[in-house]
C-alpha cells in the first residue's frame, strides 16, 4: 500500500505541480535518507543534512523521470547514493573520507554514544562501496536486490561486499575490545 501511495504522490507532483504532495514524500523519507548519510559520513551530521537536502532537491527536479521500474524508495536511495559519490569524487583531490575525523559533537545525552562512535569508526575503515552496502542492508533493512538496484552492482557483488564489510568491522571491533556479544 505504501508504494501505491508513493506513486499517487509522485503523480500529484508531476501532473498537478502539488508541492504539498512532495512535502509528504520528504516527511516520509527524510529520516531514512539522513540516517543513510550519517552512516556513510561516519557521523558527520551537518554534512548528512546537506547531502540529504541535495538529494531531495535532485529528486524534486527529476521527479518526472521516475518511471516506476523500481519502488520510489529505491529510486530515491539511488539519487542519495549518487549525491554521496559525487561529493566523494569532488573531495578526493583534497582529502578522502578515510582521513576525515568522526563528528565528535554528538549530544552527550544520547544513550550508548561510545558504541555509536565505535561503529562509526569501524564503518570508516571500510571501502566506500562496502560501507554503502552494509548501511543499506543492516541499518536501512533493504534487500540484496534493492541494494543491487541502488548501487548498480550485481547481487553477488553486493553479497561479497557485505561479507567483507562484516569481517572487517568484526575484526576492528574485536581489536577495540568488543567480544561479539
Image (cartoon, grey):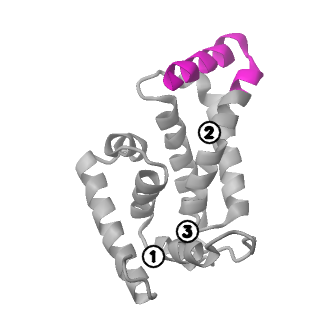
**Image quadrant in which you'd find residue 150:** top left
Q: Which residue is mark 1?
A: 125
Find residue 173 and report its horizontal and vertical position in percent. Answer: 42, 81
Q: Which residue is mark 3?
A: 92
SS at mark 2?
Answer: helix
**Image quadrant in which you'd find residue 149:** top left
Do the numbered discs 1 and 3 sit on residues whose CB atoms are within 8 Å?
Answer: no
Dot 2: few (<14), some (14–19), or many (≥20) neighbours within 10 Å? some
Position above or below: 180 against 49: below
Q: At x 66% / y 57%, what residue is drawn? A: 48
Do the numbered discs 2 and 1 sit on residues whose CB atoms are within 8 Å?
Answer: no
SS at mark 1?
Answer: loop
Q: Is residue 138 visible?
A: yes
Which image quadrant: the C terminus?
A: bottom left
The reply to whether the magenta stretch includes residue 16 is yes
Q: At x 56% / y 53%, what residue is drawn? A: 36
Q: Judge left or right: residue 101 versus residue 73.
A: right
Q: Which residues are magenta?
A: 1-22
The reply to whether the magenta stretch includes residue 113 is no
Find residue 92 and report its horizontal and vertical position in percent. Answer: 55, 68
Q: Judge left or right: residue 108 versus residue 95.
A: right
Q: At x 56% / y 46%, what residue is drawn? A: 80
Q: Which residue is mark 2?
A: 29
Q: Which mark is residue 34?
A: none
Point out the residue furthest to the front here. 181
Amino acid at each position: 500500500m505504501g508504494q501505491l501511495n508513493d506513486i499517487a504522490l509522485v503523480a500529484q507532483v508531476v501532473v498537478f505541480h502539488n508541492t504539498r504532495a512532495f512535502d509528504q514524500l520528504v516527511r516520509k523519507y527524510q529520516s531514512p535518507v539522513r540516517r543513510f548519510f550519517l552512516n556513510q559520513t561516519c557521523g558527520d551530521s551537518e554534512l548528512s543534512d546537506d547531502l540529504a537536502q541535495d538529494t531531495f532537491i535532485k529528486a524534486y527536479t527529476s521527479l518526472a523521470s521516475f518511471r516506476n521500474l523500481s519502488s520510489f524508495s529505491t529510486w530515491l536511495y539511488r539519487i542519495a547514493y549518487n549525491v554521496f559519490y559525487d561529493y566523494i569524487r569532488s573531495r578526493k583531490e583534497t582529502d578522502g573520507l578515510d582521513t576525515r575525523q568522526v563528528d565528535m559533537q554528538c549530544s552527550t545525552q544520547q544513550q550508548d554514544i561510545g558504541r555509536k562512535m565505535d561503529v562509526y569508526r569501524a564503518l570508516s575503515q571500510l571501502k566506500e562501496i562496502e560501507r554503502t552496502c552494509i548501511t543499506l542492508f543492516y541499518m536501512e533493512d533493504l534487500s540484496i536486490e534493492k541494494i543491487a538496484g541502488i548501487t548498480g552492482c550485481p547481487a553477488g557483488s553486493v553479497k561479497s561486499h557485505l561479507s567483507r564489510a562484516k569481517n572487517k568491522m568484526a575484526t576492528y571491533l574485536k581489536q577495540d575490545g568488543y567480544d561479539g556479544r
